[in-house]
Image: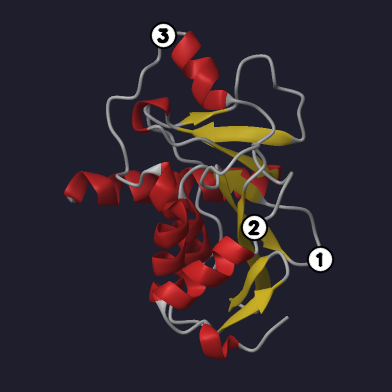
Amino acid sequence: MTASGELNTSAGIASWIASHLTEGEGMRRPYKRKWENGGCIPAHTLGTRPSERVAALAGGLASLGRPLVGADNGIIVEIADRLVRVSADQSEPGDRPPQACLMQILGGPVNYVGNSPEVIIELLRGLRQPPSPRVDVDFIQIGFPGHEQDELTYVGSWEWNVHGEARGTEFVDRAAAATLVAIETARKD
């Protein structure tokens, strides 16, 4: 790990993330493609293009106002007495932007991985509070047909092109709430 001196601006954070990408920690299934093959084409977007994911993640981390520490596989931030690793994952071959962003409370497995940095930032903000009750709105889907027995649960919104996987009931509920906040924020903009 490195001291946080170079991680005090969005540009410095983005540079660190881009040079410390992970590989093999992205989503396990191609949910976007499966939704689209089923005729579910997104009608909205949160506004972040794949080429902007790292910058959006960095800007969100900077907005938290928390000390950041660089690690070989991302950035560590302390929130609510928890050390949390945040990273971007580039598992596809070629010179493409990262396909996923992830968060992991250190000492355990990855808690959430998804295609939206906005959801990651809202998840981090939400760690300061106990998990809220499960979100029940028609534009957020929890679970995915044919994958009911997986250790990871789909949490996303095909209508908004937000796709993710959460581990365990707590993070399924947190991811759904974070997805809702990210969508509501995009609606206001």
Residue at 43%, 31% in the rendered image: 157
Which sits earlier in the primary sequence, circle 2 or circle 1?
Answer: 2
User: How many angstroms separate mark 3 from mark 1 (CA)?
Assistant: 40 Å
Q: Secondary structure at mark 3?
A: loop
Pick whichever, 96 or 65, lies toward us. 96
Residue at 80%, 59% in the rendered image: 108
Q: Residue furthest left?
A: 189
Pick whichever, 178 or 33, lies toward us. 33
Q: Quadrant of the N terminus?
A: bottom right
Q: Position of residue 89 (x, y in %)?
A: 63, 49
Instruction: Name the residue tied to disc 3.
Output: 39
User: How many angstroms separate mark 2 from mark 3 (CA)?
Assistant: 32 Å
Number of disc labels: 3
Within 10 angstroms of label 1, few (less than 14), some, or many (20 or more) residues?
few
Residue at 67%, 41% in the rendered image: 91
Q: Position of residue 19 (x, y in %)?
A: 61, 65
Instruction: Name the residue tied to disc 2.
Output: 21
As drawn, the label of residue 69 is none
Disc 1 residue type (three-letter): Gly
